[in-house]
Image (cartoon, rainbow, N blue to C red):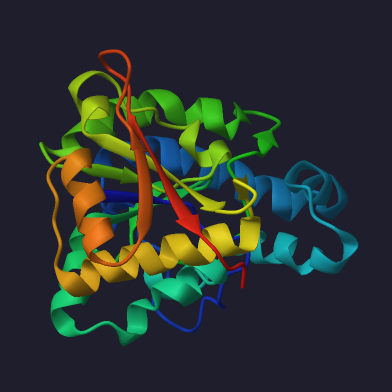
Amino acid sequence: MLVLLPPSEGKAASGRGAPLKPESLSLPGLTGARLAVLEELVELCSADEEKAREVLGLSEGLRGEVAKNAGLRTAGARPAGQIYTGVLYDALGLASLDAAAKRRAASWLLVFSGLWGAVRVTDRIPSYRCSMGVRLPGLGALGTHWRAPMAAVLPEAAGDGLVLDLRSAAYAAAWKPKGEVAARTAAVRVLHAPTRKVVSHFNKATKGRIVRSLLTAGAAPAHPAELVEALRDLGYVVEAQAPGKAGAAWSLDVLVDEVH
């Protein structure tokens, strides 16, 4: 199973570990595209703080993120699972998983990123600020930049198992499963049952809980229909819609009564 996650806007500090080694990251087929984004981002943030802040969409209070990006090549690196924070990752609670669940997380989870494309939670990266919605002056829109490299690499990463897609729209644009991979992909929304509306905070928290539940239970469904049953067995209320045409993904709505 491959679980596709969005990153978090907020990130933990890099710490004092050894600096980034781009060639050591998972999915080596993305290395060239990663280096292209890294080079332009570091150059932009080193040369003109105001322009960098504008390009990255940062408020005055986040000015320090520009300096952080400028130092990415020498900053300490930590496992991505420790760098990404926020609502989804708090609910996922990687650090508190047992040993077997941590091994599953290392194998199953793939975090999408405007800077790295996608990384495993065990990949060592520095803290950074660069969302998929950014348009760099040289490379252009990062969502577009990543499409060709992702299309070449992700089908192999998906193997022949289930793909559980929990990404937000901006990150989903970087890779859209196609063909037989799409047929075993399930895209999940979390809806407030009484209103049938997505509530951002609870959407993220519930997605984190879903992943934790699957990791802890050791549930490894091979097909979206099996995922529906696994989630229901774990206590979730799920409505599923099978694709109406070949090469399309399944749509799963997880319904929650309380928003907290």
Which residue lies at the image location 53% right of the left edge and 60% below the top edge? 204
Q: Could you say where residue 77 lies in the image, as x and y percent from the top left? A: 43, 72
Q: Quadrant of residue 24?
A: bottom left
Q: Could you say where residue 203 lies in the image, as x and y percent from the top left? A: 55, 57
Does residue 72 appear in the picture of this structure? no
User: Is residue 203 shown above or below 249?
Assistant: below
Q: Could you say where residue 131 lies in the image, as x and y percent from the top left? A: 61, 48
Which residue reaches farthest top?
Answer: 245
Q: Quadrant of residue 29?
A: top left
Which residue lies at the image location 60% right of the left edge and 28% below the top edge? 139
Does residue 158 appear left or right of residue 172 in this picture? left
User: Is residue 180 shown above or below 159?
Assistant: above
Which residue lies at the image location 38% right of the left edge and 43% below the top edge? 239
Q: Quadrant of residue 211?
A: bottom left
Q: Could you say where residue 41 lies in the image, as x and y percent from the top left? A: 62, 46
In the foreground, 19 or 195: 195
In the foreground, 225 or 178: 225
